[in-house]
């Protein structure tokens, strides 16, 4: 994966999201629409999250040092956890704001301006989302993948705004202006529910990584490889440990050799290491693989 390409996309995404945030806040203030203002503040906070992601990408690209000897991979799930938590909390805020808006009799807003805003940004945000998704097929960046969710959420917000404001305009033209006033707070409630799924999509894997929960697929793969190689080489036993932090995978394997195992030298053990490494897949900078050998089972207890 090209870290330079990842950083460039994150920079571009940050700048564009900031522009969307300013446009939303200004339009929301002028039109009096709380849902547009909410969309603007969502984009503003998303901009700060993107800045954190960019800093994380830059740190991951650096070599490990004495203080962070395993590199900076652990920062990736922490940033994603912040983003997922932010989406969840802002969804709750939107829901409560919408409910109180309905209780207070709705809001009268300038529909012409907000319809233009929603239409323009629906096209821009969906176009950018699909363009980034296509670019990330080559980069295969976890940060880009989850960062792009914010664009999908923003695009969904704009679609919801557009449909609702057009509905409100029709109601006004048909003489139901009193009902049109409830459209803006009703949108906030619907948008709040639409944001729950994306927030949980980010929170679940990020929380697993932060808590250090072993990834099931990687754990099963390592055990499958060790079962196969143990049967072929006649090992007495083994113990495996796996952990994942963002895109980094940490694999530790301890193998018990039986008494009298034929060793012609250290090259025999290195050959076994190479065999295990190949069976686990192509090695890359994000995979930390440790394979130890012992003749005493107490060292794996």
Image (tube, rainbow, N blue to C red):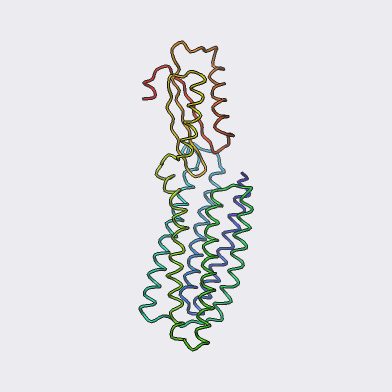
- Residue 35: image location, x then y, percent: 47, 73
- Residue 106: image location, x then y, percent: 41, 80
Vertical order, 168 against 301 (above or below): below
Residue drawn at the location 36% of the way across and 80% of the way down: 104
Give the side of residue 220 with respect to residue 125, left or right: left
- Residue 73: image location, x then y, percent: 50, 43
Quadrant of the image occupied by residue 14: bottom right
Quadrant of the image occupied by residue 208: top left
- Residue 228: image location, x then y, percent: 51, 26
Residue at the farthest bottom position: 175
Residue drawn at the location 60% of the way across and 72% of the way down: 120
Q: Which quadrant, please, contains the C terminus?
A: top left
Q: How many marks overall? A: 0
Give the side of residue 77 with respect to residue 132, left or right: left
Residue drawn at the location 48% of the way across and 65% of the way down: 42
Vertical order, 172 against 78 (above or below): below
Residue drawn at the location 42% of the way across and 22% of the way down: 237
Give the side of residue 244 with respect to residue 141, left or right: left
């Amino acid at each position: 994966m090209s870290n330079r390409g990842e950083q460039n996309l994150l920079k571009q995404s940050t700048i564009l999201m900031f522009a969307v945030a300013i446009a939303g806040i200004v339009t929301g203030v002028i039109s009096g629409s709380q849902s547009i203002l909410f969309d603007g503040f969502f984009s503003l906070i998303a901009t700060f999250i993107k800045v954190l992601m960019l800093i994380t990408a830059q740190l991951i690209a650096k070599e490990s040092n004495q203080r962070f000897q395993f590199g900076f991979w652990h920062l990736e799930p922490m940033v994603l956890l912040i983003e997922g938590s932010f989406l969840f909390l802002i969804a709750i805020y939107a829901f409560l704001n919408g409910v109180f808006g309905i209780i207070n009799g709705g809001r009268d807003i300038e529909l012409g301006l907000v319809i233009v805003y929603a239409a323009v940004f629906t096209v821009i945000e969906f176009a950018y989302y699909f363009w980034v998704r296509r670019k990330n097929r080559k980069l295969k960046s976890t940060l880009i993948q989850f960062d792009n969710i914010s664009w999908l959420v923003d695009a969904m917000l704009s679609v919801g705004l557009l449909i609702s404001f057009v509905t409100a305009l029709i109601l006004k033209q048909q003489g139901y202006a009193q009902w049109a006033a409830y459209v803006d707070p009703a949108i906030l409630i619907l948008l709040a529910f639409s944001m729950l799924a994306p927030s949980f999509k980010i929170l679940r894997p990020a929380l697993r990584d932060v808590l250090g929960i072993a990834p099931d697929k990687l754990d099963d793969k390592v055990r499958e490889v060790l079962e196969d190689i143990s049967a072929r080489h006649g090992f007495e036993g083994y113990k495996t440990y796996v952990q994942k932090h963002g895109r980094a995978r940490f694999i530790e394997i301890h193998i018990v050799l039986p008494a009298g195992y034929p060793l012609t030298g250290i090259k025999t053990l290195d050959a076994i290491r190479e065999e295990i490494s190949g069976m686990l897949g192509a090695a890359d900078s994000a995979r930390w693989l440790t394979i130890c050998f012992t003749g005493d089972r107490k060292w794996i207890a």
